Amino acid sequence: MEQDFLPLKGTDYIEFYVGNAKQSAHFYQHAFGFELIAYRGPETGVRDRASYVLQQNKVRFVLTSSLVPDSDISRHVLQHGDGVKVLALWVDDAEKSYYETMRRGAESISKPETIEDEHGKVVISAIKTYGDTVHKFIERSDYHGPFLPGFMQVDSLLKTKPIGLKYIDHCVGNVELGDMNKWVNFYEEVMGFKLLITFDDKDISTEYSALMSKVVSNGNGYIKFPINEPAEGKRKSQIEEYIDFYHGAGVQHVALATDDIIYTVAELRSRGVDFLYVPDVYYNDLLDRVGPIEEDLQPLKDLNILVDRDEEGYLLQIFTKPVQDRPTVFYEIIQRKGAKSFGKGNFKALFEAIEREQEIRGNL
């Protein structure tokens, strides 16, 4: 068996550059049940930015805002709105990860650097991926602090209640027309990922629009990155809408895994999170399409949760509407009952739901 030259232990964190990190942190605590665990900003000696670290089980988000008008963070928010800047990958050796990927054609963002404080040390390196998105390699075996050196532990005044989010299932990137294969090749050649699955415009299309998608996965399957590009259609696809408003390629959605999607989605809805709407007719022949499932159909229908089956089992999934004013980043909530796939049987229903939203926004 081929040796994995880039062994990844999982997603370390996802960092968002946002216009107002303090208020964004409040949203994720209240609506998604994250706990605020660490902070960096003027109070910790950092003068140009503020960062809030939120965690729920293995899901860790960092929300960062600039405190100065002229900075990479300010420019990122000006161009893209609130969006994902860093997909950080947890590794045993950040130096080896950097030089192995550089040798295979990666573009450097930052060479391996050791940072430390009283809790130990962390080694971090970084390379470029699609758009302005960055992969950081995080080596933290010698660190025992709340997050990273320079961050202080904080206890939020807001008492949060988790909603059952377990880990990041996958992160989806949208790229410009013609760029999908370029970035799939990047993950295969530079990072040693394997092509897991391909969807073409026959798989993912409606009367109006279509997209192409390929899913790449690392050796142990902990990291899965679907990459989407627009396909030819009568109207503007959701990928084109994203790229128009994000002004370039970027992370389209983050899929968060749960063991009890009915509880998780009921909690999210009760806290004001908006989801895409799929008509009741979707459920009329659901069991004929997917076969027997353990859940009662009624709560799935009430909460608008979708179901799909593959050779390994079935999955339940639902998609939020965008969580900021630009129609860009959104979330998927997913529960896997054996299925390893991505809900191909739901693509048409989902696309039609997204197109209804696009039409309301005047972007179809």
Image (cartoon, rainbow, N blue to C red):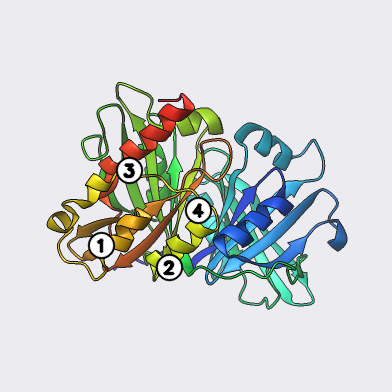
Q: Which of marks 3 and 2 is nearer the N terminus?
A: 2
For marks 3 and 2, give the CA distance: 21 Å
Q: Which amino acid does label 3 sit on?
A: Leu
Amino acid on which the number 4 mark rests in the picture: Thr
Which residue occupies the extreme left position in the image?
288
Q: Distance between the residues labelled 1 and 3?
A: 18 Å
Q: Comparing marks 4 and 1, which lies closer to the viewer?
A: 1
Q: Name the residue under label 4.
A: 101
Distance Cα–Cα, label 2 vs label 1: 14 Å
Q: Residues within 10 Å of mark 3 (few under 14, many from 20)?
A: many
Q: Give residue 37's quadrant in the image.
A: bottom right
Tag 3–tag 4 contact (CB < 8 Å)? no
Please tell me how crowded label 4 is: few (under 14), some (14-19), or many (20+) other residues with Cα within 10 Å: many
Frontmost of labels 1 and 3 is: 1
Q: Above or below — where is 202 with respect to 26? A: above
- Label 2 Cα neighbours within 10 Å, binned few <14 / some 14-19 / many ≥20: some
Q: Name the residue under label 2.
A: 263
